[in-house]
Each structure stands twice: as structure tokens, then as C-alpha cells.
Image (cartoon, grey):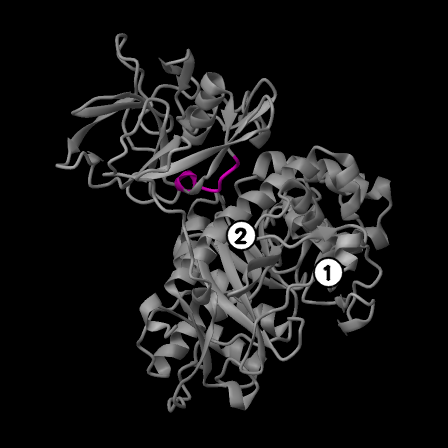
Amino acid sequence: MSTIDHDHHAPFGQLLGTAPGDVPVYSSHYPSADPAEFSDRRSYRSYLDGVFMGYKWQCVELARRWLYVNYGYVFEDVAMAYDLFELRTYKRVRDGILLPVHSFDNGSRRHPEPGCLLIWAEGGDFHTTGHVAVVTEVLTDRIRFVEQNVEDHPWPADQPYSRELLVATGPHGEYRIQGSEQETLLGWLLQTDDDSHARAPRHIDSRLLNLTAMQAPPITDDQWINANKTLDAAYLANMGGPWLTSIEADRQRYFCLSETAEKELRRATNELHAMFLYATDVVMQDESLLEKFNIPRAVWPKLQQSWNNRRNQMITGRFDFSMSDRGLKVYEYNADSASCYFECGDLQGRWAKASGITEGWDPGEDLHQHLVDAWRRAGVEGTLHILQDDDPEESYHALYMQSALNKAGIPNKIIKGLEGLRWDQDGYVIDRDGLRVQWIWKTWAWETALDQLRQECDDDETSALLHAPSKVPNGSPRLVDVLLRKDVLVFEPFWTLIPSNKAILPILWQLFPNHPYLLESAFELNASLAAQAHVMKPIAGRCGFNISIVNPQGGVMKETGGQFGQQDYVIQQFFPLPHIDQHNIQVCSFSVDGTYAASCLRVDTSLVITTHSDLLPLRALEDKDMGF
């Protein structure tokens, strides 16, 4: 949401004015929303004639609703408002026909017209999301438009627009709208067959998506990872020395990506996060789809409650990509219990400094601050308990997240396993100091808790667990007792089970067929997938376990072992990782609060990246320095 801060906002949902076509414009002052009326995320969804318009009362919702009312058009879902500038079609709802749309830069000789969309970039008052408004009047000296989620004040009685901006016309008819220093207006979006003076479609030189292998001089300071610091010491205990890989020949190897490639990762991360969450919502509304995720029915209500109430409380996740001149394709979204944060957000930058590398920048350098900011917005009240398994890698992962929590000012405690947890006399879980466990961030996957639930609990026991506390249970608290209790809020939220489960992949393909970031996926082997190499993935697998790569003749090219062999499988198109310098390279991007925050690499000589694959440093360079 992008909101300019003013006093005396109109209450959420109050009519501010009426746009042409008798389209109401509403206040989006979220702090004043009635919690009884807007009790969950679904209650904020806006529909007209059964067609989804967006979320009340955001800028994109008004733009889509205005177009629908006045022209019968809608546009596809976008991750951010600024992504509208890349649209190339509107869909006419009555017959599904796609109509051409063109973007015109601010200052274009093709002037805006009433009914076109103005698009702002992210930044300033429109931090993160950008902004969109609908033009209502185009004058020689000014332009008027309607918008939501900017100034939540009723319009004067005789004013049929939200705002107006001054315009300067150049000697050749260039039409330039004058915004404030805090706003960057990209331009306007017109539905037209005429592309004269239109902005050229975004084109990426495919070579700029290729990674380049580099070699740094040997590090002479073996203290660049400091054994006297708790976090560093935990990492050293896991790795056995001050390096990012146990393979000596690779210790000074790193890879570079272009500025264009990083921008494409940013765009893909933002767009895919929105797509995965859209698919999650579709699953939540269709029990026949939810059944494919192999989640016990007894916890479906809790899953639905989590989605309805905690849709915006996901802190962070990780996307895994194949990126090369063949394109950018996502394998999966680790929306629950992802790893590699310390390596990406700290060590790869430190490694570059210790190696004397000054060119370019570290694409992970902002990750820690993004996490700090996300935790500050998370609404944690009281002490947060960090639950980790007794594993060396999870130790430094937990400590890194703890450092972000500390900087965010959130009291926290780390617990290994379930050490010291017990019941109090009222049936609540407490730690060894008697403090109730009410807020949790965990390194454990939700699927681990579900496995325990499947093995140990029948439906009655599960129901009692979900509605606890009521009486003091017997024995020590189990993982399911801690994570699934009614009085405990866990990060990542329970609903992240859905986008993390591989069963989401065929659903995404059904919803967004042939999307450029997606790979064809299905629940059963179809003719299309059988005719090409494909990958068999367990629906709830992790860490590259139990993966099989099958060639078109049915022969197994590669398979991995693991603990998920009894799971149902999905089939995904095989799209190999780029093979560079004897390594298969997987690019990872991190989302924080649903937007791109950082990127890093995982590498392996194997076709499948697993939990044992190395993380080698990544640098970003300006396009001109990539040598293509």
C-alpha cells in the first residue's frame, strides 16, 4: 500500500467522490477499517458482477473497476502497480477477446486520453508498489485523474476528480506531466491499435541472463570469519573452516550476473510471489484441490483460518530458478523454512571484501535490513521464541535471524529442539524460565509437524490439540503441541504449507498456462510431458530429496534418495540448470514481505541441487562490464 500521510483521514470505505461512469472512489485508510466487518483477508476482496477487481480500496482495484464499468475490460493480476506499465493486453470480459495496449513514456508525443491509466514507479510516496490512476480530463496545462490509496479526503462537492497535475508541452508536442520530487511518473497506458510513439516492448538481450564464472586471488586473512563471534563460530562449526565450500579448488571461485539479470530476478520474484498466493487462494476455495496436498483434514479449518487472518504475515521465502540465455524459469517456492540467509546476506559480501573484489555490488547486501524492517511490521507482542532443530546449519541460520530480530527490537530466545519446554498449570506451553510460548519463528518445516501428527494423533486428538488450551496434557510438549496450538502464532504462518508444496505447481500451470516464468507441470504424466525429459517431485519434499529426472524414453537420468519416497508426486518439465565451469548453477532469490530482497547461488556437479550443495559467492555488474 502506498499512502501519503495526512491527518484526519476519511474512515475506511467512505465515499470520497464519484468518477465518470458513476464509479465510486473510496477511502483506503486501513487503520480505521472495522475489524468486525473486515475480519480476514478475504473480506477485503472486491468483486463486481462476480469478477475480481482487487483489494479494497487500493489503487489497482479502482483502475480495474473503472475499466470494467466503463469499457468492460479487465487486466491480468500484477504483483505491483508499476508492473502495469509492461501490460500488452486488456481482456474484454463478455467474449474473452484480448485487446492491444501500449505504454507511452511521460513526455511522449502521443498524449494521454481520458480513460487511460497513469503509472508511477516505485519510490518516494509510492514506496515498493508504485501507483496507478485513471485519467478523466486532459487539458493543455494540466491533467486530472481519479485514484485510491493516496489522499483519503472527500472531494469538494463540485470536483469530479481526485487530483490534478501541471503539464508542460515541448516544441514537438511532447506532453510531460509535472509530478513532485517524491514521485516518478513512468507514463500512461492506452488501449489502442496505433503504436506510434509507443514505448518499445521491454526486450532483454538474452545473453545478459547468462552467468559468468570468475576467479579471485587467494584470501590471506583466515580471520575473515571471526571465531570469536557467536554467529561466525556456529558457521565455522558446520563448515569446518573459513570458507563457503569444502572443495578447495572452488574456494576462490565466484560468479557474476548482469544488472539486467538482477532486475529480471526482482521482477520475477515479485510477480511469482503474487501468482503463488493467488494459486493458494484458489486452493483454499476448492476442497478437491486441497485434497491433493496430502494435508490431514482435521487441520483444514486451521489452515483456512491462517490464510484468512494472516495472509500478510509471511516474513520471507526463497525462489529457486534456472537462469540462462534460454530464459528464467522457477522450480519452486520455499515459502516455509527456507535456508541460506546468512550466506547470502552476510558471508558472500564479506568474502568479496576479503578477496579484494571491488567491481560491481553484492546482491545480498540489503537482505538483513529487509528482514529487520519486516519484523518491525510483523506485529509481534512480547518475546518471540526461535525454535530450531539440533543441527549445525540451523544453528547459524537461527542466530542470523536472531540478529535481525534484535535490530528490530523484538525480545527473543533460541530453543534447540524442544529443550526445556513444559506445560504450565493452565495447559499453556512455557519455556524453562516459565515464560509462555506465544510467538514463534521456526527452522522446522510445517511438514515435519504434520508427519508427527499423522503418526501420533487421531482426529479427536488433533481437534483437541487445535482447540487447546483446556486441560494440562500428559507428557512433555511435542512439536505439534507447540506449533499447532490455538494460542501460538508461528512464522512462517501455517498457510505457507500450500505454496511450499509441489502440488501448487500443476495448479499454477493451469491458472497461468505458458507463463514465461513457469515450467509445464501436471499431477499425472500427460502426452506433452512424456514426449520430453521431465522431473518427478514428491509433493512435500525438501532439500532435493527423492527427485527423479526421466528422459523421453522413460530412462532415469538422475535420482536422489531421501525421506519423502512415500509421498504423492507431481511431474514437471525438465529445464536443466546452466552448466558453467563444471558446475550446475541454481539462482536463488529471497522475498521479504512479498517483494525481492536479495539473490545468491547454489552449485553442484550433480543435476539436482540438494541440501548438501555449496553456495558460491555472487556479484552483480553493470551490463557493460559483463563482456558480452
Query: How busy is the neighbourhood of tag 1: few (under 14 within 10 Å), some, or many (20 plus)?
Result: many
Q: What is the number of callouts on the image?
A: 2
Q: Secondary structure at mark 1?
A: loop
Tell me: residue 234, above or below residue 241: above
Residue 122 x %, y %: 34, 44
Q: Tell me if 120 is positioned left or right of 172 in this view.
A: right
Residue 104 x %, y %: 32, 38
Asked whether the viewer can see residue 622, the reply is no
Of badges 2 and 1, nearer the viewer stands 1
Q: Amino acid at mark 2?
A: Leu
Of residues 481 and 452, the one nearer the viewer is 452
**Which residue is pictured at 40% across the width and 88% down the height?**
219
Q: Amino acid at mark 1?
A: Gly
Give the magenta range: 76-85
Circle 2 is placed at which residue position? 384
Q: Examine the image and state in which quarter residue 421 appears.
A: bottom right
Q: Examine the image and state in which quarter residue 597 appears.
A: bottom left
Residue 605 x %, y %: 63, 80
Determine which of the numbered discs, if any, sits on residue 541 in the image: 1
Of residues 578 and 251, the one nearer the viewer is 578
Of residues 191 and 276, the one nearer the viewer is 191
